[in-house]
Amino acid sequence: MANLDALLTLDHPDDYARWRDRKLAEAPWRLDELIVEVRDPRRLTSGERNAIIDRCRRANMAIYVSALGGIADKVIPHRLGEQLGLLRLDHNPGADADAITSVSVQSDALHRGYIPYTDRPLAWHTDGYYNDPSRQINAFILHCVQPAADGGINGLIDPEMLYIRLREQDPEHIGALTDPTAMTIPANIVDGVEVRPPSIGPVFRRGEHGRLALRYSDRRRNIEWRDDPATKAAVDAIRRFLDDPTTPSFRVQLDPGCGIVCNNVLHSRSRFRDDARPGRLLYRARYYERIAAT
């Protein structure tokens, strides 16, 4: 693991080069390399746990596959998280009382107007990019209870691969994106009341355990970027990376009982269609910790 200063600054090029070479040598390139078969995610064996952690070390994500089927029980992601060192859940506004979110099509007053609770596509983003610095999301679990009849495919990109592409293209992109005022999410105001203040911070940031972390949304509205040429060039470079078909990314359609566990990687969702009830249902748990290293 590189000294984080070698990634958040440009002062240690040799350290960065060693980290980059090791990262590229160990990174998975095919979806099946991310998959870990588990008997029961609530009770991992030591081998299953180690396999998940290894994939998260190399790619910041793993996909677990189990034969549990569509059991609607939020204990599943909760217990899985505990076994991976994930204990502090983020109580975001759309979550249920236990801080685990039921991601489904919902039109009540609490969820109306928020794209995750519709059948519309979700652009590339990391979770909690609008949170304040004391509540940054470092990991999340997405557990599938019921997939959509059609669509709802998740795209996944390791933020460290984005970092490497940007730095190799132009190191000044990193300087712009680590600026503490690089990206501002304006205040969320509902009926004239501020329910969340503005969130101002960098794109690449210091995560848990001295690891690189990302804060990003590809939304084109309600985002304020630092108004200077370097930031504009860096954001344009990110968007080209996300649109490039050669970008190292993964696409996965989760089946019942399966899920994603990750260090808050870049992710997206395609539009989906439900033919009947119950419709698409996933449980999402967001954490302030990263996945355990051992």
Image (cartoon, rainbow, N blue to C red):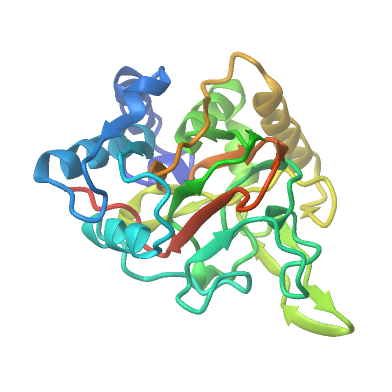
Residue at the image point whose x is 68% and y is 59% from the top:
181
Q: Quadrant of residue 105?
A: bottom right
User: Residue lying farthest top?
Assistant: 246
Residue at far left of view: 46
Residue 151 coordinates in the image, percent (x, y):
65, 33
Decide which of 254, 287 is in the foreground and name it.
254
Q: Residue at x 18, y 40 (%)?
A: 48
Q: Position of residue 51 (x, y in %)?
A: 20, 36
Residue at (57, 71) in percent of width and height: 92
In the drawing, does residue 252 fall left or right of residue 12? right
Residue at the extreme front of the image, as rendered: 276
Q: Is residue 182 visible?
A: no
Q: Please say if 143 is above or below 31.
A: below
The answer to whether residue 25 is visible is yes
- Name which quarter of the figure residue 193 lies in: bottom right
290 shown above or below 194: above
Quadrant that contains the N terminus: top left
Question: Is 89 placed above or below 11 here?
Answer: below
Front one among 135 and 257:
257
Q: Residue at x 29, y 24 (%)?
A: 22
Residue 91 against residue 124 in the figure, above or below: below
Apparent side of residue 124 relative to residue 135 in the rendered image (left or right): right
Instruction: Give whichever of 277, 251 is nearer the camera.
Output: 277
Side of 279 relative to 35 (left or right): right
* Residue, far bottom: 193
Please provide percent x and percent y for residue 215.
Answer: 58, 51
Please state which of residues 20 and 270 is positioned toward the viewer in this rendering: 270
Percent position (x, y) of residue 73?
39, 62
